[in-house]
Image (cartoon, helix red, strand yellow):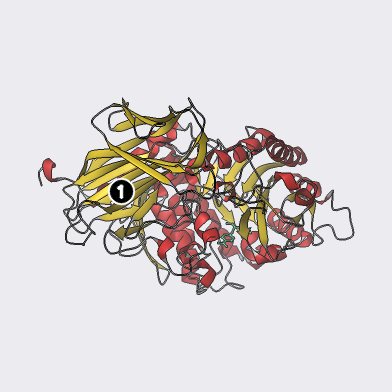
Amino acid sequence: MTPASRLGLSGARVEVELEPGDASSAVRRASAAVRGPGSILLTDSVEVTLEPAEPAGTAGWSVANVGRSSIRVRSVAIVFRLHDAQPPLKMLRHGYQSWSPSDVAVLGVDEDPSHTPGSLELVRAGAHADQRIARPGELRSEWVTVLTSGDGSALLVGFDGGSRHDGTLRLAAAEDVGPAAPSSPAAELRAEAFLGGAVLAPGARRELHALVVRTGETAADAAALLAQWGAVTSQRGSARREAPYQAGWCTWYHYFHDVTETDVMANLAKAGADGWPFSVFQVDDGYQAAIGDWLTTSDRFAPGANHAEGVARLAAAISEAGYRAGLWLAPFLVAPDSAVATEHPGWVARMPGGEDPLPGSFNPPWGGGLGGLMWTLDTTHPEVQAHLEEVARALREMGFSYLKLDFTYAPSFDGVWHDATMTPAERVRAGYEAVRRGAGDDAFLLGCGAPLSNVVGLVDGMRIGADVAPAWNNERRDRARAGYLEMLPATRHAAAATFSRAFMHRRLWCNDPDCVMLRQEATAMTPEQVETWAQVVERSGGMAIVSDDLSLLNPKARARFERLLDVGRAVDAEALAGRGPWCDDLMSSPEQPSGLSGRTGEGAAAAFRLQVDAPGGGHVLREGLSG
Ligand code: 9PG
């Protein structure tokens, strides 16, 4: 294979999509050819400037409003022609948020999930940067992608950040060539800066995140290319990547919504009595009076006592037992009947073109007055930012120095926002920034349900996959989730994401693969599936948080957790030194990736490869590999 025949990018054009100022007119598109660095006028008001940027292989760019009236920019894109693409042309579809799957699709064969009959906009909005349905035949990936050509050559294209706007890579048949057939993939790659309709005032210019482009010889280079991209993005975003290794306990995957104060106290006592080696003890969903009212407990906590003191009492009990106190909250959601929503209706974002509150999630167990429909706080509003900061500060003062921030994609939705100049990414980030201000620089913030690219530099840990469950597979064929079943809880889904996003660990944050479950009763996992998941967590080097009723765990389970910590810490130390585990079948696995290679130290004896049978939950671990 000569270098000239390798998959690459050539001739490009720039495109802009403008939103109408009012609901009646249509989206406008304009495009122009790129002839080199410099400024290009796309309409009488939109100018895109491309400049060569450092390090080599990255391109800097910006968009400006040179007209006399405000415009609303949906997206700005550089559209590259791909040269020397041989069929099958494959795309790594990296997911948008914590729970979104990452997989490989073939141009001309696979469809974007937004085309699945019955897919809901509320679900799409939480699964992609752009909640609108993709163009027919188009494949998309968020933040970064790797493409491989039939000859094996690989190409990475990614944005070097996501704090100012999301970045979506869209792969499609080249427009002037006709529909892509698997046999003739004349294709275009669209690197789209997604501004979501943010207002650009006359004279305003917005810097866009630079593009990183790297080529590889074979599909097996994908993991190395992603590691390089992760290192660049980490540095650009001042990633918080050095928090201590986390070992802990969490209520969720045993008690779920039914958790009581008695359950928490019983586990706290058991953890102390048996000397479980936890540093953090985290209370999850279920303690709160309502979604949005994070400082007041529900009736299952502090029965008969003062609910205004219940949250502080939890922190005190955990701290007294010698653990770091951790708490779950979904800071940007409010239940319609919560105190915060009824006292401050003006803090809720509005539906596009209307007065109705903007839904952010639908979760029936939460109730809330509308059967589980939750509203979204307007994180661009200064009063909301002050509120989020105060809530975080109050929790910190009670003793919670570990906060799991969940369902945090909600402010990315299309809607009417107090500050219309902010992009979806900036709305999400503004909420996280407020929490960080209140919680303090030394708090451990764990992102969850989070648009990954938006919060680099603000979070210490990040959930990088779907929820585990006390079951390997998820048999729910929920019609409301059409197209997005892989976001539903299943340990199998969490394992696939732990492999595909392994390269992020200790580059962008500490990966949270989700909780370890070691119990052999009150679970639908077989003993082998339990062991498989323990191996996935330990070999990832990521966070190790147990979520079992500790009274169900025997000394064997306890010993297994201690071994998990030994291996996990060793893998994590390698990751901190830049030698973290990698997924070696990212582009070649027929379904989701299933293998992880890495090291627990120096030398051939410390090298390992873990292979998981995704449908069945079996595994093969080989250690002491040479090379
Ligand atoms: C608490 C839980 C746990 C868990 C989080 C999050 O409908 N869904 O797609 C859906 C996905 C994940 C989810 C809940 C619902 O779980 O990831 O660890 O904190 O919330 O409610």
Front position in the image: 417 or 268: 417
Amino acid beneath label 1: Val
Residue 385 location, x and y as percent?
Answer: 68, 37
Which residue bears the numbered disc 1? 146
SS type, badge 1: strand
Point out the residue furthest to the front here: 24
Residue 511 location, x and y as percent?
Answer: 49, 47
**279 relative to 177 in the view: left or right:** right
Front position in the image: 143 or 241: 143
**578 relative to 308 in the view: left or right:** left
Residue 91 location, x and y as percent?
Answer: 30, 54
**485 relative to 296 in the view: left or right:** left
Front position in the image: 541 or 457: 457
> Which residue does the image show at 55% across and 35% down from the upper left?
421
> Which residue does the image show at 34% across and 56% down from the upper left?
139
| Residue 52 found in image quarter | top left
* Mark 1 burial class by Cα count in 10 Å: few <14, some 14-19, many 20+: many
Q: Relative to 462, say whether 60 is above or below.
A: above
Q: Relative to 609, say whether 399 is above or below.
A: above
> Which residue does the image show at 52% across and 73% down from the upper left?
476
Front position in the image: 616 or 458: 458
Confirm whether residue 276 shows in the render: no
Q: Relative to 626, say whether 261 is above or below.
A: below
Point out the residue furthest to the left here: 2
Numbered-mark total: 1
| Residue 80 found in image quarter | top left
Residue 195 location, x and y as percent?
Answer: 47, 40
Q: Quadrant of ligand 1?
A: bottom right
